[in-house]
Structures are given as structure tokens and as C-alpha cells.
Image: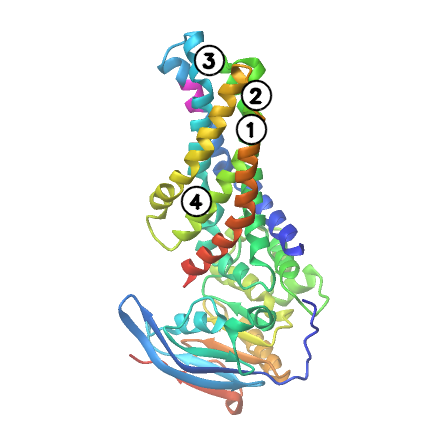
Amino acid sequence: MTIKPNNTSIHCLAAQNLSCERGRRELFSDVAFSLNSGQSLIVTGENGSGKTSLLKILTGLSLAAEGAVLWDQQDIHHQAQSYQQQLLYIGHRAAVKTELTVRENLQLLLKLWPNELAMSIPELAACVGLRKRLSVQCGRLSAGQQRRVALARLFVAQQKLWILDEPLTALDVEFIEAIEQQLGRHLDNQGLLVLTTHRGIEIDPAKLIKLELSR
Amino acid sequence: MNIFLAVLQRDLKLALRRRREVANPLVFFIIVVSLFPLGVSPDRELLSEIAPGVIWVTALLASLMSMDAIFRSDYDDGSLEQLLLLPGSKVLLVLAKVTAHWISIGLPLIIIAPVMALLLYFPAHAIVSLMVTLLISTPILSLLGAVGVALTLSLRTGGILSSLLILPFYIPVLIFSTMAISAATSNLPVMGYYALLGAFLIMSLILVPFAVVAALKVSHN
């Protein structure tokens, strides 16, 4: 359980001819890629092309109709425990409890998830620009602010693989820049990044792999 | 164990914030039981005759109607998929959620039950057996209910379907609980019934969390 992740180790996420079906409809087939430490994969495609489904398959939450996802050359379902230690997934639903205050939500994030940086709640809130809103119930925050609470995890994460589904939705320009910086830092630290987005995101093109899903 | 305590604490805190939702089954229980003397007959003999059944059926329905809350809001806001991705035991996670649900729904029912029992001229010497059966059986109801809810999470009409799925499994619990109470009422030995209910509880504590984890995974697929 307490395997200390080696910060310098090189990881690899690979997909082998993944296909996904919803009902009887095939969303995509023969998706393959290989992603190494320090690289990011941007998944694009029109609405309904299966971006979210692909990301869920990569996290191991859903199963692919065919194909396999490999983490360090091993099927993720054969090493679920160690894969989940390395995985940070933020879906398009924010997973922020609206009944709890910002402080309580952040406390939960810090408590449930392994994190490296010893950051206090106010510091973390300051990172996401919610320092003055600590005792506000999240249900009273705007969509963008709720999103910020969810994205606070990016500032303390020690996981190597980040899978983000539309992380920039509803965010203002300033905070998008902060997130882009954080993503850049993650890549510099030999992290892996998979994300979907409709808008452009500034990431070093040398580290970028693009994957377009088309029907 | 950490994950158990963290999730338990989280869910109890959420239950405190959603007092209305938590109070619903309790209010239902109180209203239905108190309507019986008005609707059936205020006759002492008759009421004390049907009291165990009335209280048990109502408690069972109250617990059934509250089951959906155990996973629904976490499923809707994406928290459940996050919890499923936590490194660590998913079985402990499920046990924590069921325990929190039982504490916020089952426990208040047990506490209020003796008061409602008096309302129905429940024989005073059998009230202990009413409490004991509720204490052993409501966790079984919560555990079994969690399977049904987990299986039907991704369906829009999950509520009805999961009730239909769970109800057959609730029936043995209902039968043995009411049998224990009638035995206690007529001063017959009750330990046998308690032992059987206890066996049900242990079996479901051991087996059900695994079923719930599997069902949650199916619902997210």
C-alpha cells in the first residue's frame, strides 16, 4: 500500500486498438496511442464522438468493447491498485459536494487522496483563488468557482497520470493561465497528461500528441 | 481502515446538512403508524394484535423509500466515480456508505419505535424484542437495499425497479422479525429467531459489500 512513488521513474500509458460501443452504436474503433512521461495527449472530436467514453476507459471505470489499456506494459485491470495510486481523474462532473463549504470540500480532497505537498487549506484555497470564500457553501458558488474547487487537486497531486475531461469549462482567463502553468509543471516533472478540450490550450507542441476521434 | 472512517465521516456530515431528506422516512414512519388507530379501530385488543406487523412493515417501507439516497447524489455529481477510483479497498468504502446510511436512517427508526409501539398498545413486555429485531434487521435492510440501488443507478426509473428487486430479499427478514416478536408476546423462547436474524446479518455483512462493488462497477460501465 505504501509504495513511495519514484519521482524520476518513466511511465508509459498505451492503448491498443480500443473500441467502444454504446447500445448498438459504435462510438470509435481502433484507437491506439502510446504516451510517455512528459508527454500530453489531447483528445479532440465533435460532441458525441466518444471523448468522455475514451477517458473513462483509460481510467478503468468503463470497459472497452475491444482492445486494452496498458500502464507500463501491463493491462490496467490486472494492476488496478497500483494504477489507481498513479491516477488522477477529473471528470466533467465536478464531484464537489454542494452541501459542504469550500473548506470542507478541500479537506475531503486532502484527506481522501494521497498528496505530496503539505499544504494547508487556506493556502490551497489561495491557489484556486477562493481564499475569501472558505466558509461559503459550494452550492452558492458559481459554476466556475465550483470547477476551481474540483481543480484544486491539481495543486497538491502527486499522481503521475492526469486524465482531465474538459478541465477548462466555465473558467475565467486568469485561472485558465494558472491551470496551464500547473499542467506545464506536471509535464516538466515527467508527468503524463490526457485531456479533452474544445478550446485551444497552451502546451509545448513538442510534448503534444493529438488524437482526433471521428465517426 | 482510513478510507472507512473518512467516508463514514463525510457521509454523516452530508446527512446532517440534508436534514430534510433524512427526516422524510422518519416522518413517514410516524404518520403511518399513528394513522392506524384512526383508520382501523381504536380497539385495544385488535391494535395490540396487529402492532408488530404494522410497525415492522412501516419500518421496512421507510427504509426502502430512503435507500435511493445512499448512492444517488454521489452518482449524479460525479463523486461516486471519484470514490471508486480511490486506491484502497472498495469493500470498506461500500461498508462505510452503508453504515452512514444506517446511522442516519435506521438508528432514528429504532429509537422512535418504542414510542410508536405504545401508541398501538404494544404489549410492554415484548418491546425489548421489537428493539432487538429492529437493531439486528435494519442493517440487513440497508445492506440489501444498497445492492438494488447500485444495480439500478444508471437507469432513470431506478427507484421502482430497485424496490422490486430488493423486496423479495426483505421478506424473510420481515417474517422472522415478526415471528420473534409474536413469540415474545406469548412468552415463548425467542433466541432461535434472534440467532437466525443474526446469521442473516453476518452473511450479508460478509457477502453484500462485494456484490455492491460489482454492481457499482456495472453501473459506471
> In the image, is residue B102 above or below residue B45?
below
Residue drawn at the location 60% of the way across and 45% of the way down: B13
Residue B37 in picture, x, y percent from top left:
41, 14
Q: CA distance from mark 2 to mark 3?
A: 20 Å
Q: CA distance from mark 1 to mark 3?
A: 23 Å
The picture quadrant where one finds residue B76 is bottom left
Question: Which amino acid type corresponds to the residue marked 1 in the rendered image?
Answer: Gly
Comparing A51 with A171, the one in front is A51
The label nearer to you, 4 versus 1, is 1
Q: Name the main secondary structure of what is drawn in magenta.
A: helix
Q: Are the residues flagged by discs 1 and 2 from a single subunit?
A: yes
The label nearer to you, 3 versus 4, is 3
Instruction: Name the side, left or right, on which A48 lies relative to B124.
Output: left
Please name the residue that numbered disc 1 is placed on.
B192
For the residues labelled 2 and 3, say whether their Cβ atoms are less than 8 Å apart.
no
Residue A74: mark in rendering: none
Q: Are the residues flagged by discs 1 and 3 from a single subunit?
A: yes
> In the image, is residue B39 above or below residue B158?
above
The label nearer to you, 1 versus 3, is 1
Q: Which residues are magenta?
A: B31-35
Comparing B20 with A13, the one in front is A13
Please name the residue that numbered disc 4 is placed on.
B68
Residue B187 in picture, x, y percent from top left:
55, 15
Instruction: Name the side, left or right, on which B37 lies relative to A98.
Output: left
For the residues labelled 4 and 2, say whether their Cβ atoms are less than 8 Å apart.
no
Please name the residue that numbered disc 2 is placed on.
B189
Q: Are the residues flagged by discs 4 and 2 from a single subunit?
A: yes
